[in-house]
Amino acid sequence: MTEQLVIEDLHTGTEGTRSILAGVSLSVNPGEFVALVGGSGCGKTMTAMSILQLLPQHVRVQSGSIRLGSHELTTADEGVLNSVRGGGIGMLYQQPKRMFNPRKSIASHLKEPLRRHCGLQGKAADAKVLELLAEVGFDEPHLGAEAKAHQLSGGMAQRAMTALALAGAPDILLADEPTSALDKMLEVQVLELLDRERRERGLGILYITHNIRTVAQFADKVLVMEAGTIVESGPAQEVLNYPRSPYTKRLLEAASLAPEGNRSRQGQPVQEHGVPDHGVQEQSAQKRREVLSLDRVSKDFTAKKRANKRGNRPALIDISLGLGQGEILGVLGQSGSGKSTLARSIIGLEKIDSGSISLDLKNPGLHNPDLRDAGRAGQHSPVQLVFQEPHDSFDPRMRLQTSMEAPLLRRKDLTKDERSALILQAIEEVGLDPQLLDRLPGQCSGGQLQRLTIARALLLEPSILICDEATSALDALTQRMVLNLLLRLHRDKGLSLVLISHDMDVIRYMSDRVAVLFKGRLVEVAETVEFFTRPQHEHSQALVSAALPVCELLSRTVRPSPLAKFFPAEVI
């Protein structure tokens, strides 16, 4: 019999300060999907950490009650808590790679809760590991079991974390932004897996998210959090169709990046499409002076990872693509398709095996053909990359003020006060409180750190900005603010953007053209309007089909999946 989770009047905070959580009350019944929605830093993750009693140093539950069945967790001893963590309550974290021991295989991680909570060892545990990995979508579970977290893509690591959260057969699953790093197709796959577990095993799910689409499609009940307080709650259809709180209304409005907001230039001739074996050779529909050009770029990691044992394929295969002056190029593709490898190759962090990547030196901002050295001695850096995982972008031992100041130290023309002024201006542009600069990275939320990475990338006034899932960790309000900031910089400074994202609305809202990667190949390039109205490649069609409008999700009672061609039937 699964247990009910009940939280009553929870206050969590530090000594001598106001509460981080101020009177939070909620319940998750067996088989219920409850969504906790709110902006970055509002207290969603702190709620989950309070439930598990895994709070940061100097933070504690000040008052209130947290009950799992008959267990009062706020006063439970470590023995009870250790049986609850992973057993009674599973946790699915937002940044999966940071949660795995980099020296241990995925199988080693999964065997621990199987032994502790299910009593499985030896061959029985080995078999269950493979079963769990297959259940969450590993095509070759034995390869996933042997791998370590750093050898997996972001999406594969999130699936491995899902398997780990389910390994102890929990009654309640706390899912903290578990699909923010996933493309839309994998997001649907993971959510339908969780929904199936909910229905078949009576698993209660507390789903922490800023993704209003997810809420619309899967949640039974929605709670909206602002500044540590629940400001609205009720059945999902009621909250989303008839919101009462002004904050809920703003969230819903911000989530609607409507097609009419699309920036694509209307009325341009549409390029011809083709999918030859070596991939699409991109040709722009309109003649633009290219500031960045890739010619038959290939990258193969298999030699380093023992392809005969690991079964890896090349990451990039004959990619030819150009970026025009002042253009915003959207790059789509499922997890593991090569998007991040493409970004790292452009910036010079990965050495390509063949082909060429060149800059247009007529552009004064792009003054060095070697991207690894470009701007290193100058005042400006022509190409900057905003990484997907913000926690990996900062030294955890260094205060954020020092990390933000580091790229400006190369500018000998600036005084310390001038550097500080530029940093404050960048912080304000991305909507953050300057007091955050006194913190360590571990004291900030994922959304706050992501905005800091964008601010830092802009400090050296790049001519080309590559954003690798730069808004995936942001709530709808912050996402729209950051996207509009990028659009303003694009308009005012002629900034060229390569926007890598799995969020179809972001791509549609921002991009002039769309490029689609599939298994390391460039399979389609099209003007944005043309792509979303008439996608040519079957993978592009599946991506567009998976990105349903919010209004359609709200009205649906049946949830057919468009993914059968790309994923095994048992995990759809």
Image (spheres, rainbow, N blue to C red):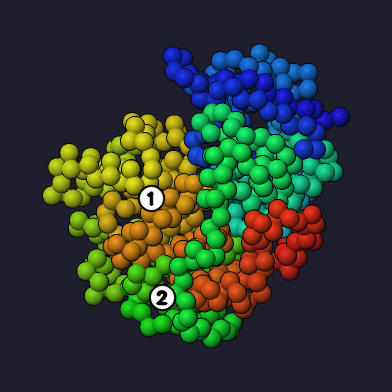
- Estimate the x, y position of residue 111 in percent, counting from the top left: 72, 38
Q: Label for residue 454?
A: 1
Residue at which label 2 appears = 322
Q: Secondary structure at mark 1?
A: helix
Q: Which is more toward the observer, 64 or 199?
A: 64
Mark 1 crowd level (few <14, some 14–19, many ≥20, 10 Å Cα): many
Q: Is residue 33 left or right of residue 367?
A: right
Question: Mark 1 or mark 2, which is nearer to you?
Answer: 1
| N-term-proximal mark, 1 vs 2 | 2
Query: Which residue is located at x 23 percent, y 58 percent?
Result: 380
- In 3D space, how far apart are the residues under numbered discs 1 and 2 (Cα atoms)? 23 Å
Quick check: 472 above or below 9? below
Using the rendered view, name the quadrant where residue 405 is placed: top left
- Estimate the x, y position of residue 16 in percent, counting from the top left: 44, 14
Q: Is residue 264 left or right of residue 375?
A: right
- Estimate the x, y position of residue 79 in percent, counting from the top left: 70, 17
Give the amino acid at mark 1.
Answer: Ile
Q: Is residue 377 left or right of residue 345?
A: left
Q: Label for residue 51?
A: none
Query: Which residue is located at x 33 percent, y 64 percent?
Result: 491
Mark 2 crowd level (few <14, some 14–19, many ≥20, 10 Å Cα): many
Quick check: 5 above or below 537? above
Dividing the image into 4 quarters, which one contains the C terminus? bottom right
Query: Which residue is located at x 55 percent, y 23 percent?
Result: 22
Dividing the image into 4 quarters, which one contains the N terminus? top right
Give the amino acid at mark 2.
Answer: Gly
Q: Is residue 294 left or right of residue 528?
A: left
Using the rendered view, name the quadrant where residue 322 is placed: bottom left
Query: Which residue is located at x 39 percent, y 64 percent?
Result: 497
Quick check: 179 above or below 34? below
